[in-house]
């Protein structure tokens, strides 16, 4: 089991677009002015539109500013509503349309992930900051506290990781923990190459029933932790020991109920993907008795079950079989040379 990591909680500043915003500042009484010419948030070739995308997503929250203006240094024009501005001179699509399209796709993916039973945490950063460590711990805890299986993957470059991740067919969904710019750039690759949903930590909260799709959206670790504290859900990670039994009782479902209530464990939910009621395959941890001595076997390990091993048994091809001792050993000989389409003479 993972050992507890009880580190002292730190104050996390509120930031938007890389700028620190005082916590006592009410954004609803201010207007945000964005200065820049590259407004095409559908493009991920540079950091400027990617940063703008996350500014718009963050400011679209209920506690965001009332107005967002934009100023173009190139044309020296001021737009008093950035959402009505075209993406580029050659693209008449407005920022409002592009932003809505992005949010619809994110909502589609989180609904698709609601039936996931095996979720992998994909680490896309080399940071070891306080917010990263706390976000990783809360993500793993929330997956396991709802009866799902959690794996943690660390890959090199995310841009070339799609083919590697496709080898893990037993994974139903991924949750990416990375910086905001990396997440936005990964979304484009995810649309083209990934076979299963890749969620952000906030989208995972909605899929698991911890949070509602209420307009608040952010890929910033600090925002998620701060919103947890405001909603009274920050205690579910204190003293977490990796066994998945913590305080998942704090999680609320989309209808306001408790996701771990025994009365609602077998309650079906309407899937917007299939258009019908679906049954969750997860097992509620609230039914697990904390008194191990009263359980069969008195809390001793009598059987270990791995979701990955169970999935492997169902696969037709399970890899090369060693068959040690069953195959006759032969002396190695030289084979043919050349490329496969034109071998030379056998030596």
Image (tube, rainbow, N blue to C red):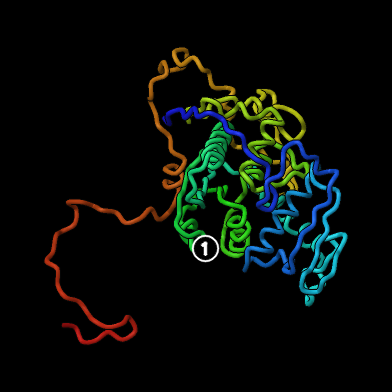
Q: Quadrant of the C terminus?
A: bottom left
Residue 230 spot, x, y in % from top left? 71, 31
Answer with left or right where residue 162 lies relative to residue 18: left
Label 1 sits on a secondary structure element that is helix
Q: Nearer the viewer, residue 2 or 276?
A: 2
**Does 212 appear above or below 252?**
below
Estimate the x, y position of residue 291 in percent, counting from the top left: 49, 14
The answer to which of 68 and 96 lies nearer the viewer is 68
* Residue 165 shows in this picture: yes
Q: Is 122 situated left or right of 264 in this image?
A: left
Residue toward you, 52 or 315: 52
Residue 160 placement (x, y as % from top left): 49, 63
Tell me if I can see residue 174 in this picture. Answer: no
Residue closest to the eye, 48 or 94 = 48
Q: Is residue 61 left or right of residue 196?
A: right
Name the outermost residue toward the left: 331
* Residue designated by label 1: 159
Q: Residue at x 67, y 31 (%)?
A: 229
**Rendered-image quadrant of the N terminus:** top left
Percent x, y of residue 166? 49, 57
């Amino acid at each position: 089991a993972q050992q507890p990591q009880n580190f002292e909680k730190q104050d996390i500043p509120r930031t938007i677009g890389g700028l620190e915003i005082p916590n006592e500042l009410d954004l609803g009484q201010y207007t945000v002015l964005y200065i820049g010419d590259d407004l095409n948030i559908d493009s991920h070739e540079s950091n400027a539109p990617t940063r703008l995308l996350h500014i718009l997503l963050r400011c679209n929250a209920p506690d965001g500013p009332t107005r967002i203006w934009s100023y173009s240094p190139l044309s020296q024009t001021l737009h008093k509503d950035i959402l009505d501005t075209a993406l580029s001179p050659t693209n008449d699509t407005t920022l409002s349309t592009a932003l809505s399209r992005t949010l619809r796709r994110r909502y589609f993916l989180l609904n698709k992930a609601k039936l996931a039973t095996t979720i992998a945490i994909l680490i896309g950063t080399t940071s070891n900051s306080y917010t990263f460590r706390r976000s990783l711990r809360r993500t793993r805890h929330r997956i396991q506290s709802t009866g799902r299986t959690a794996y943690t993957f660390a890959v090199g470059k995310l841009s070339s990781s799609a083919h590697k991740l496709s080898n893990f067919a037993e994974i139903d969904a991924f949750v990416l923990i990375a910086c905001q710019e990396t997440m936005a750039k990964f979304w484009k690759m995810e649309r083209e190459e990934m076979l299963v949903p890749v969620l952000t930590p906030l989208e995972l909260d909605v899929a698991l029933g911890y949070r509602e799709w209420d307009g608040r959206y952010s890929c910033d670790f600090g925002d998620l932790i701060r919103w947890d504290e405001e909603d009274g859900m920050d205690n579910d990670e204190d003293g977490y020991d990796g066994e998945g039994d913590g305080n998942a009782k704090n999680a609320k479902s989309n209808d306001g109920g408790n996701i771990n209530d025994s009365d609602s464990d077998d309650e079906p939910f309407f899937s917007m993907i299939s258009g019908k009621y679906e049954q969750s395959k997860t097992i509620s941890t609230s039914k697990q008795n904390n008194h191990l001595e009263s359980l069969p076997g008195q809390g001793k390990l009598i059987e270990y079950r791995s979701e990955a091993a169970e999935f492997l048994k169902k696969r037709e091809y399970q890899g090369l079989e060693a068959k040690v001792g069953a195959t006759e050993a032969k002396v190695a000989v030289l084979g043919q040379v050349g490329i496969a389409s034109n071998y030379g003479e056998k030596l």
